[in-house]
């Protein structure tokens, strides 16, 4: 690579903050909590783990979660190596552009935008349902339509998104700390009381690990790690990114893998490995909350009911912040209106991107309400669509990282290990994407025309990004050349 290219990269590294216009002072714990909050631990425990047990490999679910954590960690090794080399804002959008070219890069930028926007909508839907449930069943208040509460969440999220990320990270830290305390208290209670028939280790035996559908279990397991990559999107808003981002990324993966594996194991022991499948088959919706009530008491049960909302709100706030930064980066490059890529002079936040995102979310939610879609189906389909789009992103970035590191002669062979790890993750993720496509109905609950529409939407948005890159190359070279925050 030429000296001029190296000088250009050095200039990008030096001026990335001023180019992007975003600044912050998040430390390791704040970044970890911001990203993990996006994952919604209580949402996963109450709604996701029972589904994974029922449709996946039953009592072997905890091991599946750990294996998926290892695969994600392998991808993270390459991701961080490449990120440290480039030192650019833009997250997946910038990394995939550097690895696979501007056409694929802009396609991935659109895919990421759609992915996180869908996650935001699903969080609003779930939050509205959860808050209504908490008001009626815990506080004995009146029933209110879910979209009213969702609208209130949107307003609060918009206000918080206007300010610097450090302010939102403090809010997310408080909410996530409460979620972790609840889950740890539950785990300790199950272990202290010996579960239903004594603490068993059946989950770690080959018979249970390979029972049921291991492929479906793996598909659900990969979905648990949504958001781990968001550490790189906040590059300009953390202090000492060379240290903070790697530590936070590995911390997020380790925390999610261990937390969900242990909690799933305790959940299985709370009913017994032999009985848990019957329990989730009969009452999948209430299996987790009933277990909480049995082992930690009525107060914890009420707290869990409330925390389903607070976890949804934290998820919505984190998703809003991540999506706003993709809008900001696409605006800064001129793909979207450049005004969206300008930071607030005082708060150095993506305030215009944040507001535009909220207006768009409000309009889409309005369409959902006007169409009178059942709220439970709405959340399930949006959450499944997000998971599908997330796997597409992971496939692209795994390939991009591997290709970039293998051809980067500045690494002098030092990146071979991370590159191979990323390419191994790429193969596994391709299989996961095939499984997700094959089992799309299971993932989203959508069938027939709706299934085809949802698949067409996510692939259509992705391909639209690639088509726009071709148009820009032919008609607006200056914008094309800036794709990927270059």
Image (cartoon, helix red, strand yellow):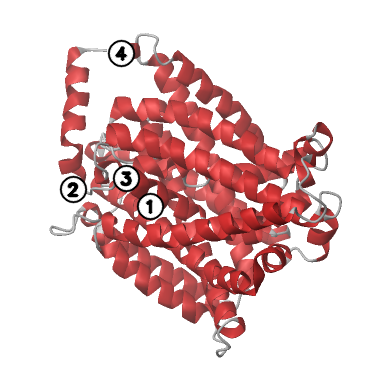
**Local crowd size for mark 3, using a 10 Å CA cut-off: few (<14), some (14–19), many (≥20):** many
From the image, tell me which residue sits under label 1.
Answer: 322
Q: Earlier in the sequence, mark 1 or mark 2?
A: 2
Q: Quadrant of residue 117?
A: bottom left
**Residue plotted at (26% across, 46% down):** 237
Marks 3 and 2, how far apart at CA = 12 Å
Numbered circle sitting on residue 234: 3
The extreme top residue here reads 412
Q: Earlier in the sequence, mark 3 or mark 4?
A: 3
From the image, tell me which residue sits under label 4.
Answer: 410
Q: Position of residue 79 (x, y in %)?
A: 42, 30
SS type, badge 1 = helix
Q: Position of residue 127 (x, y in %)?
A: 52, 70
SS type, badge 4 = helix
Q: Can you say which quadrant of the picture contains the C terminus?
A: top left
Marks 3 and 4, how far apart at CA = 25 Å
Q: Which-is-in-front pick, marks 3 and 4?
A: 3
Marks 3 and 1, how far apart at CA = 8 Å
SS type, badge 2 = loop
Q: Can you say which quadrant of the picture contains the N terminus?
A: top left
């Amino acid at each position: 690579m030429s000296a001029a290219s190296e000088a250009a990269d050095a200039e990008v590294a030096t001026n990335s903050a001023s180019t992007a216009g975003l600044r912050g002072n998040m430390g390791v714990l704040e970044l970890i909590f911001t990203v993990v909050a996006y994952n919604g631990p209580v949402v996963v425990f109450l709604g996701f783990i029972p589904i994974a047990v029922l449709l996946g490999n039953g009592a072997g679910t905890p091991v599946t979660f750990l294996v998926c954590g290892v695969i994600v960690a392998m991808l993270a090794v390459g991701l961080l190596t490449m990120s440290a080399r480039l030192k650019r804002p833009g997250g997946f959008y910038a990394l995939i552009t550097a690895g696979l070219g501007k056409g694929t890069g802009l396609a991935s930028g659109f895919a990421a935008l759609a992915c996180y926007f869908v996650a935001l909508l699903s969080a609003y839907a779930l939050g509205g349902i959860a808050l209504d449930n908490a008001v009626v069943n815990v506080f004995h208040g009146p029933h209110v339509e879910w979209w009213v509460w969702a609208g209130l969440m949107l307003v609060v999220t918009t206000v918080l998104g206007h300010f610097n990320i450090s302010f939102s990270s403090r809010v997310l830290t408080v909410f996530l700390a409460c979620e972790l305390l609840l889950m740890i208290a539950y785990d300790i209670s199950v272990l202290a009381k010996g579960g239903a028939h004594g603490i068993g280790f059946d989950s770690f035996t080959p018979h249970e690990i390979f029972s049921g559908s291991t492929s479906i279990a793996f598909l659900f397991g990969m979905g648990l790690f949504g958001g781990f990559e968001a550490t790189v999107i906040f590059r300009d808003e953390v202090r000492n990114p060379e240290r903070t981002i790697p530590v936070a990324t590995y911390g997020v993966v380790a925390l999610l893998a261990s937390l969900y594996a242990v909690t799933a194991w305790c959940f299985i022991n709370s009913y017994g490995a032999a009985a848990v499948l019957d329990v989730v088959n009969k009452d999948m919706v209430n299996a987790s909350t009933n277990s909480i009530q049995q082992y930690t008491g009525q107060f914890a049960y009420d707290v869990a009911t409330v925390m389903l909302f607070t976890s949804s709100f934290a998820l919505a706030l984190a998703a809003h912040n991540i999506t706003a930064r993709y809008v900001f980066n696409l605006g800064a490059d001129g793909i979207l209106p450049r005004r969206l890529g300008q930071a607030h002079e005082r708060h150095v936040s993506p305030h215009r991107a944040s507001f535009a995102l909220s207006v768009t979310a409000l309009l889409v939610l309005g369409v959902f309400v006007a169409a009178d879609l059942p709220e439970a189906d709405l959340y399930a389909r949006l959450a499944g669509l997000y998971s599908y789009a997330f796997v597409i992103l992971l496939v692209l970035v795994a390939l991009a990282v591997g290709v970039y590191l293998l051809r980067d002669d500045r690494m002098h062979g030092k990146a071979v290990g991370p590159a191979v790890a990323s390419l191994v993750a790429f193969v596994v993720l391709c299989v996961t994407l095939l499984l997700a496509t094959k089992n799309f109905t299971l993932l989203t609950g959508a069938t027939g025309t709706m299934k085809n529409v949802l698949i067409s939407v996510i692939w259509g948005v992705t391909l639209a990004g690639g088509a726009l890159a071709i148009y820009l190359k032919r008609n607006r070279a200056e914008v094309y050349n800036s794709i990927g925050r270059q």
